[in-house]
Image (spheres, rainbow, N blue to C red):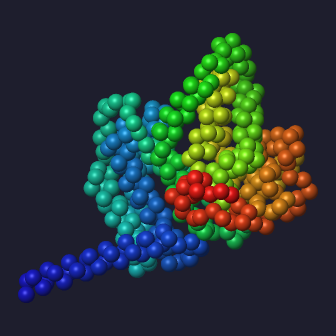
Amino acid sequence: MLKKRIVAPAKKIVGNVNEALSDTTELLNQSGELKPGTGLASGVVALTLAFLSLLAVAAFHYPQYLTTPELRHQYSPDLLRHVLFAALVLSGAISLCNVLFNHNRGLNAVAGSLVLLSVAFGGSHVPVNDFPDHTPYIGLDWFILDLLGSTVIFVLIEKLFPLYKGQTIFRKEWQTDMVHFTVNHFIVGLALLTVNFAIHRLFGWMINDRIHDVVQSIPFIPQLLLCILAADLVQYWTHRTYHEVPFFWRFHSVHHSVKTMDWLAGSRQHMFELICTRVGVLGVLYVLGFAKEVMDAYIIVVGFQAVFNHSNVHLPWGPLKYIIVTPDFHHWHHSSDDLALDKNYAAHYAFLDHLFGTAIKKQTGFPEKYGVKGDYMPDGFIKQFLHPFRSQK
């Protein structure tokens, strides 16, 4: 009798856990609009915050392996603890309320469980002891900060100034692009190591201190504009090569296979292309020897534009559209309309395409469709990674 009293509740608990995990897995495989009033939208917020909080706790435990050296020296541990505490409280409160009011209980139960797990492993009170600085690492902290910042900033901009008003946050194939986003952030240590090695091997012999002195004597703003121009000239011709040389197009076609443009779309990029482009761009900037503060500013500019120009955003740019690359300009580059094929290559300065004769002219309205012509790219990160090695297109 006692055994039955114990086994029955245990089975019920296991059943509830399986149901909660099943609901969450089903949600992550879906796309479309989040219906208000069901606890689904708030549950997604709670689950996201809880998951990122758990990752942050892990980063506090193992900073030498999970955080980026260039970033960890800039952190304020006290501020990060306050942010982590607020995220745990907010996620826990949302998930608890939804469970109590029977709104998507499975999803919110998983979020609440992740909050409890984070607290059990120390929460915002994990001590950080001295640790070695030169260890292999993955950019877990960069992933957390970029995902949180990008969703808050760019989703808000997309909702305020949408190009396509009916487009949902969780559009089709968002899962594939989120995997690209995650992998590209987690391999940041390996990518930087590879890029730095290649740059020193390929460009080291070109270093000239006199050139560095001349470049660094230029005032900050003109030097930054020159830095962006030098980078974009390399980007333009590299990008054009990806389109016009069939071997390189195999890799670049992964990036062009995205069918819906938003802040996450730019993350779909083959690792080979990512490394080759960075070697070329950063190699030239390394040879020219721009000042550190200029390089730091350039990284912010390129990081913002890379996301913003893929976003579902439309603004009245006026004459600026002929000078700088805007979302309108870059959206046409991703179009599979005949008018747009192999056009609008620049990443920062739109006038480069006008200068080299590759700017789209006489276009009206906005693209009708996006993606590679023929829609031959498979969905899924692994399939897209392997595609260039298998495809003969």
Tell me where residue 110 sits by quadrant: bottom left
State whether residue 135 is above or below residue 165. above
**Residue projecting furthest to the bottom:** 1
Residue 218 in view in this figure: yes
Tell me where residue 97 sits by quadrant: bottom left
Most foreground residue, 381 or 383: 383
**Residue projecting furthest to the left:** 1
**Residue projecting furthest to the front:** 392
Most foreground residue, 173 or 87: 173
What residue is drawn where x is 33% and y is 55%? 118
What residue is drawn where x is 71% and y is 61%? 372
**Residue projecting furthest to the top:** 210
Most foreground residue, 199 or 229: 199
Total numbered labels placed on residues in the image: 0
Relative to 318, 49 lies left or right: left
Q: Which quarter shows the C terminus?
A: bottom right
Most foreground residue, 310 or 314: 310
State whether residue 170 is above or below residue 55. below
Relative to 311, 68 lies left or right: left
What residue is drawn where x is 48% and y is 69%? 28
Q: Which quarter shows the N terminus?
A: bottom left
- x, y (%) of residue 378? 59, 64
- x, y (%) of residue 213? 68, 14
Relative to 274, 220 lies left or right: right
- x, y (%) of residue 383? 54, 60
